[in-house]
Image: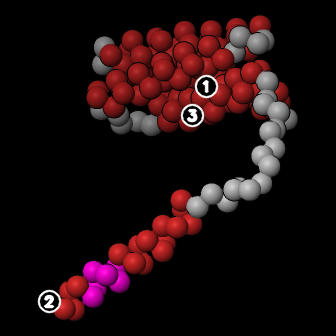
């Protein structure tokens, strides 16, 4: 019993000592410098790039992977639709990007509809049609961020 209490005290003390750096305020006593916030254009471009690269990977897998079950196709279609909607929403700063996003979203919409109906070959073909458009969006957003 005595060993158990000693062990408990050692464990609690160690945990408390390890937690101190986590909760410590490293900036206390220092004047805070406020950095300029990036413009909304650059943050929306960053969001567009993040979503476009995720959609790019998702569509590449969907267009090249042979064996997805119906449940996986529905999930992939829904995820792709969410990403394409977010890309479209963040592409408003450029008419060219907006057009690419609109076209990619229409192919993703068709892919999702085919996936919901259980037509894997049609879903795969629409995913393949959307890939070059999403690739162009990734390139466009990467150029804008650099």
Question: Residue 109 at x, y = what percent?
Answer: 48, 12
| Mark 1 vs 3, N-terminal side | 3
Q: Which of 82/128 is in front?
A: 82
* Location of mark 1 (residue): 131
Q: Residue at x 82, y 33 (%)?
A: 36
| Mark 2 vs 3, N-terminal side | 2
Left or right: residue 100 versus residue 118 is right
Q: Secondary structure at mark 2?
A: loop
Question: Residue 44 at x, y = what percent?
Answer: 70, 23
Left or right: residue 11 versus residue 133 is left
> Disc 2 vs disc 3: Cβ atoms closer than 8 Å?
no
Q: Which of 143/89 is in front?
A: 89
Mark 3: give few (<14), some (14-19) or many (20+) Cα within 10 Å. Answer: some
* Location of mark 2 (residue): 1
Q: Secondary structure at mark 1?
A: helix
* Location of mark 3 (residue): 54
Q: Residue at x 54, y 15 (%)?
A: 85
Q: Nearer the viewer, mark 2 or mark 3?
A: 2
Q: CA distance from mark 2 to mark 3?
A: 55 Å
Question: Residue 136 at x, y = what percent?
Answer: 73, 24
> What range of the chain is rendered magenta?
6-11
Picture layout, residue 86 above or below residue 5 = above
């Amino acid at each position: 019993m005595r060993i158990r209490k000693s062990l408990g005290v050692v464990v609690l003390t160690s945990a408390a000592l390890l937690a101190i750096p986590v909760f410590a305020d490293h900036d206390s006593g220092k004047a805070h410098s406020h950095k300029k916030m990036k413009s909304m254009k650059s943050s929306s471009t960053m969001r567009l790039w993040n979503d476009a690269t995720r959609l790019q990977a998702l569509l590449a897998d969907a267009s090249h992977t042979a064996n997805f079950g119906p449940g996986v196709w529905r999930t992939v279609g829904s995820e792709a639709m969410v990403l394409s909607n977010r890309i479209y929403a963040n592409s408003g700063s450029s008419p060219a990007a907006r057009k690419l996003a609109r076209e990619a979203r229409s192919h993703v919409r068709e892919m999702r509809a085919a996936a919901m109906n259980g037509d894997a070959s049609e879903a795969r073909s629409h995913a393949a049609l959307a890939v070059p458009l999403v690739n162009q969006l990734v390139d466009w957003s990467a150029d804008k961020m650099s």
